[in-house]
Image (cartoon, rainbow, N blue to C red):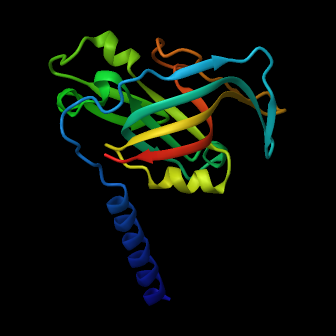
């Protein structure tokens, strides 16, 4: 029994090391990698999609090309079944390695955090050119693509901003603006396609 536990622990450690290697960040050369702002087309009458006991209501078509600043994976809890991954994304000068070298970025508890000792660009530009976005894969293929994403890559994502709800009263609303900050400012994206763009 003890040998079995040791083997199991060794396998778990090996899997953790392999996953960390697979997701190690890339460090592209300086320069803006994703110049365009996200494109959002609001919907007058959203459709409803069912994911298990969760109803998703589409609020807007969403199209974004952005640099991945950080990624966070979630495996435990009901939320993780619906949203297995968050991506902190940046566009404009928030996709430039020269700017990002002066910004400490992290994710925790479904939030994205940044810290600077000295602002490389104005605070408001950081706030409006980056966001934490919750990813709901539309199918197994999209989920697989999301699992390959690494910080430093540029991705193109198309899908819908959605609100999520359950019959018991639970709900999670998407942000509808790139200008907001703090709690409630994250986008909830039903991802229909994701492409990792060449450097």
Asked which quadrant contains residue 36, the reply is top left
Q: Residue at x 25, y 11 (%)?
A: 122
Residue 169 vs residue 194: left or right? right
Residue 120, placed above or below residue 53: above
Residue 22, placed above or below residue 64: below
91 or 151: which is nearer to us? 91
Asked which quadrant contains residue 60, the reply is top right
Q: Residue at x 53, y 21 (%)?
A: 39
Residue 100 vs residue 178: left or right? left
55 or 192: which is nearer to us? 192
Q: Residue furthest front?
A: 198
Q: Residue at x 33, y 22 (%)?
A: 92
Residue 22: % across, % down:
37, 61
Number of marks = 0
Residue 89: % across, % down:
41, 32
Q: Residue at x 52, y 25 (%)?
A: 186
Residue 155, placed above or below residue 99: below
Q: Residue furthest left?
A: 118
Residue 57: % across, % down:
76, 28
Residue 32: % across, % down:
27, 29
Residue 193, placed above or below residue 131: below
168 or 118: which is nearer to us? 118
Asked which quadrant contains residue 9, the reply is bottom left
Residue 102 vs residue 95: left or right? left
Q: Residue furthest right?
A: 167
């Amino acid at each position: 029994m003890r040998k079995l536990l040791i083997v199991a622990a060794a396998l778990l450690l090996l899997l953790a090391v392999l996953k960390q290697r697979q997701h190690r960040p890339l460090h592209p050369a300086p320069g803006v990698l994703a110049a365009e702002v996200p494109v959002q087309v609001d919907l007058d009458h959203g459709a409803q999609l069912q994911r298990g006991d969760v109803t998703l209501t589409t609020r807007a078509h969403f199209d974004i090309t952005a640099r991945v600043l950080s990624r966070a994976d979630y495996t435990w809890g009901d939320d993780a079944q619906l949203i297995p991954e968050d991506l902190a994304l940046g566009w404009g000068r928030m996709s430039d390695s020269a700017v990002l070298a002066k910004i400490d970025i992290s994710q925790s508890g479904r939030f994205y955090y940044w810290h600077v000792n000295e602002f490389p660009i104005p605070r408001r530009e950081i706030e409006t050119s980056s966001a934490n976005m919750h990813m709901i894969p539309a199918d197994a293929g999209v989920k697989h693509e999301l699992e390959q994403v690494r910080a430093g890559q540029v991705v193109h994502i198309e899908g819908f901003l959605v609100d999520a709800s359950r019959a018991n009263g639970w709900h999670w609303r998407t942000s509808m603006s790139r200008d907001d900050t703090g709690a409630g400012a994250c986008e909830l994206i039903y991802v229909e396609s994701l492409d990792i763009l060449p450097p």
